[in-house]
Image (spheres, rainbow, N blue to C red):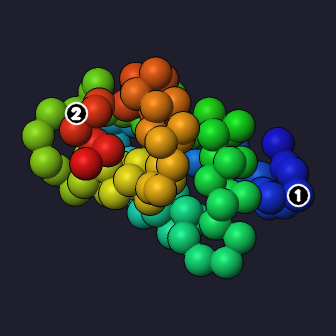
Amino acid sequence: VTSHTDPTGTLGAVVDCLAAHGGDPSAVAACGLLLQHLATGVGAAARRAAAMEAGVLPAVAAVARRWDGDCAAILACRAAVRSLTRDSAALQSAARTQGVPAQWLL
């Protein structure tokens, strides 16, 4: 699904990738790094909002339940969640509501 804030459909592709390859640490780490990148820079606020609309947080939360510890995949997803929700109590609350572990927001 494309939108003006995600014209290439990247966010939907990341959600699909996490769903299909959530057990592959390399794929999960790549998705986390991409999300972290998308959440920064010019226009980041709009991309963060688009990420919420695309269902990124529930997809990341599902991955969090599959993995334990501090492997590269989890570290990349934690960094992505922090980038996506930074400076927004509303987004942090949404993340917790959608199953993202609270410690990921620190």
The structure residue drawn at horizontal position 68% and vertical position 48%, both measured from the top left corner, is 49
| Front one among 61 and 97 | 97
Can the viewer see residue 64 in this picture?
yes
- Residue furthest left as drawn: 69
Q: Which of marks 1 and 2 is in front?
A: 1
Q: Name the residue under label 1.
A: 4
Q: Residue at the location (22% across, 33% down)?
A: 67
Give the spatial CA distance, label 1 vs label 2.
Answer: 33 Å
Q: Is the residue marked by circle 2 packed among few (<14), some (14-19), or many (20+) residues within 10 Å?
A: some
Is the residue 59 above or below the residue 88 in the image? above
Q: Is residue 61 shown above or below 5?
A: above
**Which residue is rendered at x = 64% and y = 66% of the image?**
44
Which quadrant is home to the N terminus? top right
Q: Is residue 26 left or right of residue 14?
A: left
Please indicate whether residue 90 sits to the left or right of residue 106 in the image: right
Q: What element carries label 2?
A: loop
Q: At which x and y percent is residue 3?
A: 87, 51
The three-letter amino acid code for the residue at tag 1 is His
Question: Going 69% across and 38% down the picture, which residue do you hit?
Answer: 54
Q: What x and y, as percent, mark residue 22?
A: 40, 36
On screen, 10 above or below 60?
below
- Residue 101 or 25: which is nearer the viewer? 101
- Residue farthest to the bottom, as pictured: 42
Label 1 or label 2, whichever comes before in sequence order: 1
- Using the rendered image of the protein, determine whether residue 32 is visible from the camera's viewpoint: no
Q: How crowded is mark 1: few (under 14 residues within 10 Å), some or many (20 or more)?
A: few
Hey, what amino acid is under mark 2? Trp
Can you give x and y, in whole percent of width and height, for residue 70 in the image? 13, 48
Q: Name the residue under label 2.
A: 67
Task: Please name whichever residue, 64 or 95, is drawn nearer the observer in this view of the structure.
Answer: 95
